[in-house]
Amino acid sequence: MCGSCGFPAAPGHWTEAGAASAPDRLRERLRRVKILKKVLKVASLSVHDGGLVPGIQLFDLSGRQVIVQDLEQLWIEAEKLSGKPFDPLNPIFLTADN
């Protein structure tokens, strides 16, 4: 269990499938966050994952912050923070200049 956030240590996320070693899993977590930052920027949200603790920090421009454990929870919390429905498959994210 993480002493900072209280989440139990997770074995890994499905997006890390195929990552055979700890450095590979960390690299995949950081790559996932890079993509999330681009997608969430359109909604004035951002994320941080330092790779040291379980979970992803999601925050808005006013400083409100929540720690989420996975991508499913991230999209739910993104809607709450932005105050509007959030569809990560919206075509605007494919064409956004981020």
Image (cartoon, grey):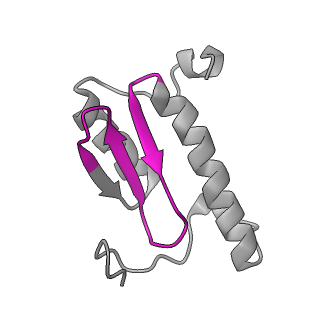
Q: Position of residue 66 (x, y in %)?
A: 28, 52
Residue shown at 56%/22% (left/top)? 93
Q: How many marks?
A: 0
Q: Which residues are magenta?
A: 42-65
Q: Residue at x 33, y 74 (%)?
A: 7
Q: Can you see residue 88?
A: no
Left or right, residue 33 beside residue 20: left
Residue 59 or residue 14, whichever sits in front: 59
User: Residue 57: x, y in percent?
Assistant: 38, 54
Q: Is residue 47 magenta?
A: yes
The C terminus, quarter of image? top right
Left or right, 59 with respect to 90, comes to left
Identify the residue at horizontal 31%, vertical 32% (top origin): 61
Residue 30 visible, this orientation: yes
Q: Is residue 59 a member of the stretch shown in magenta?
A: yes
Q: Quadrant of residue 15 in the image?
A: bottom right
- Of residues 13 and 33, the one nearer the viewer is 33
Q: Residue at 67% across / 51% down in the picture?
A: 31
Could you say where residue 41 lies in the image, as x and y percent from the top left? 47, 28
Q: Is residue 96 left or right of residue 27?
A: left
5 over 16 or under it: above or below: below
The N terminus appears in which quarter of the rendering? bottom left
The vertical placement of 77 against 24, above or below, is above
- Asked if residue 48 lies left or right of residue 3, the reply is right
